C-alpha cells in the first residue's frame, strides 16, 4: 500500500452542523429561531446539491448562491446574497479537525496522503491550513472539475498521486458519495463511522470507529 485518500468534511473536519454559524448570524439579525433557519438550509441544500455530480460541472459557489437566494427570499433578509456567501465560506474554513486526525502526522511519513473533497478551493484550503492537516495533495472538486461519486475525480486524484488504484485506499464518511465513488473507481474503501450508524447497503464495507484504527489495518 502506497497511498491513502481522505475525504475532508465529515472525515477529517467536524462539519456535522455545517450551516449553524450562518444560521446563527441570520437568527441574530432577524430574531428568528436558529433551528428553523438551519433546517431550511438543510432542506435547500438537498434540493440544489442532490445529483449535482451528474450535471454539467459548476463550482459549489454557484449552487450556494442559488441556495442563499432562496434563504434570502424565505426569511426576507436585508443584506445581499454575497454578504452571506462570504460569511458562510469563512465559517466553513473555521471548522475544527477531529482529534484522531493527529494520526496523519504518523501516516504522512510512510504513505502518500491525498485529501479529496467536494468543495471549492476558497474554503477547503483554509480548513486544511487552519488545522495543519498533513498531506501531499489537496484536490478539490473545483480543481478536478468533477464531484464525488463520479469516477472522474478519483481518477484525477490517482493521476496526481502517480498511483494505481490497487496501491491506495480511500477513507470517507458518506456511504453514497465517498464509498460508492471509491468502489466504482476500483479503490478499496473504508467507512469512517464514529457514531456506528446502520448502513445496510454497505454492510460489507470495512468500518472505522476512529482514524487511529488505520494503523493496524494498513499493516494487514
Image: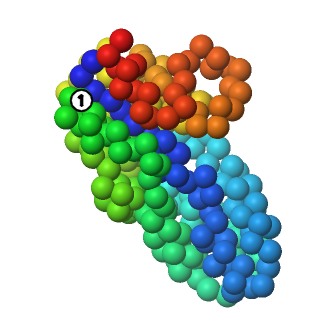
Picture coordinates of residue 4, whole percent (x, y)? 33, 29
Residue 106 makes an appearance in the image: yes
* Mark 1 residue crowding within 10 angstroms, few (<14) / some (14–19) / many (20+): some
Residue 59 makes an appearance in the image: no
Q: Mark 1 highlights which residue?
A: 111
Name the side, left or right, on which 197 lies relative to 214.
right
Q: Is residue 121 above or below residue 4?
A: below
Q: Is residue 13 above or below residue 148?
A: below
Count of residue discs = 1
The N terminus, quarter of image: top left
The C terminus, quarter of image: top left
The quadrant holding residue 104 is top left
Picture coordinates of residue 56, whole percent (x, y)? 50, 44
Q: Is residue 47 above or below residue 64?
A: above
Query: What sort of colour scheme is used for the picture?
Result: rainbow
Nearer to the camera, 106 or 167: 106
Picture coordinates of residue 159, whole percent (x, y)? 24, 29
Q: Is residue 30 above or below residue 101?
A: below
The quadrant holding residue 216 is top left
Picture coordinates of residue 50, whole percent (x, y)? 65, 44
- Give the residue drawn at x 30%, y 55%: 132
Name the side, left or right, on which 91 lies relative to 176.
left
- Give the residue drawn at x 42%, y 33%: 212
- Give the residue drawn at x 32%, y 16%: 219
Element type at marker 1?
A: loop
- Give the residue drawn at x 75%, y 81%: 76
Amino acid at each position: 500500500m502506497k497511498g491513502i485518500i481522505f475525504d475532508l468534511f465529515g472525515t477529517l473536519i467536524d462539519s456535522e452542523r455545517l450551516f449553524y454559524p450562518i444560521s446563527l448570524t441570520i437568527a441574530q439579525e432577524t430574531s428568528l429561531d436558529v433551528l428553523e433557519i438551519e433546517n431550511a438550509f438543510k432542506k435547500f441544500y438537498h434540493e440544489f446539491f442532490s445529483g449535482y455530480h451528474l450535471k454539467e460541472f459548476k463550482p459549489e459557489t454557484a449552487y450556494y448562491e442559488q441556495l442563499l437566494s432562496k434563504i434570502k427570499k424565505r426569511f426576507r433578509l436585508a443584506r445581499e446574497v454575497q454578504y452571506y456567501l462570504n460569511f458562510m465560506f469563512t465559517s466553513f474554513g473555521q471548522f475544527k479537525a477531529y482529534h484522531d486526525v493527529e494520526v496523519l502526522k504518523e501516516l504522512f511519513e510512510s504513505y502518500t496522503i491525498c485529501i479529496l473533497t467536494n468543495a471549492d478551493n476558497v474554503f477547503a484550503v483554509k480548513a486544511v491550513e487552519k488545522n495543519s492537516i498533513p498531506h501531499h495533495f489537496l484536490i478539490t472538486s473545483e480543481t478536478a472539475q468533477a464531484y464525488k461519486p463520479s469516477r472522474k475525480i478519483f481518477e484525477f486524484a490517482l493521476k496526481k498521486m502517480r498511483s494505481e488504484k490497487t496501491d491506495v485506499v480511500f477513507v470517507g464518511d458518506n456511504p453514497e458519495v465517498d464509498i460508492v465513488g471509491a468502489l466504482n473507481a476500483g479503490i478499496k474503501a473504508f467507512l469512517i463511522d464514529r457514531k456506528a450508524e446502520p448502513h445496510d447497503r454497505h454492510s460489507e464495507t470495512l468500518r472505522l470507529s476512529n482514524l487511529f484504527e488505520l494503523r493496524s489495518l494498513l499493516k494487514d
